[in-house]
Amino acid sequence: MLMAHPAVLRDLVEQYETLAALHASESESTQVRQRMEDVAYTLCVSTGTREVETALAVARDQLRGAGIRTVPPRR
């Protein structure tokens, strides 16, 4: 299986977390929601998964294996 470069994964995870925070704080911004869906799709493709939560977990595991820290998941 092809693996995305760690820098790309880190950027995608950070983008998704930032957009998720914006989405939670704004009242259904169409642009934020669309960008979040785009990043989620790219994360899924990059990690070979179908659900964004799984993609985030896989990306974090791959980054941890590469010795790269990420933003902790929001709960």
Image: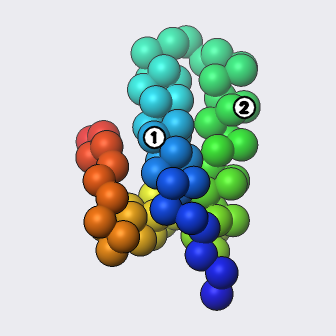
- Outermost top residue: 27
Q: Residue at x 52, y 45 (%)?
A: 11
Residue kind at label 1, given as amino acid type: Glu
> How many numbered tags mark residues here?
2
Visible in this render: residue 18? yes
Residue placed under numbered mark 1 in the picture: 14
Q: Which mark is residue 34?
A: 2
Q: Which residue is drawn at 64% across and 16% down?
A: 29
Q: Residue 4 carries which label?
A: none
Return the residue nearer the eye: 53 or 12. 12
Return the residue nearer the eye: 66 or 51. 66
Asked if the residues shown at circle 1 and circle 2 are in contact, with their CB atoms under 8 angstroms apart, the answer is no
Residue kind at label 2, given as amino acid type: Gln
Question: Quarter of the image containing the N terminus?
Answer: bottom right
Viewer-side label of 1, 2: 1
SS category of the residue bearing label 2 = helix
Q: In this view, does 39 lie to the left or right of 56?
A: right
Return the residue nearer the eye: 30 or 10. 10
Find residue 64 and report its image quarter: bottom left
In the image, residue 68 above or below residue 74:
below
Return the residue nearer the eye: 44 or 11. 11
Visible in this render: residue 51? no
Q: Residue at x 41, y 71 (%)?
A: 62
Question: Quarter of the image containing the C terminus?
Answer: top left
Residue 16 % position (x, y)? 52, 40
Find residue 14 and report its image quarter: top left
Find residue 71 and report its image quarter: top left
Q: Give me the C-alpha separation between circle 1 and circle 2.
A: 16 Å
Residue 66 % position (x, y)? 36, 70
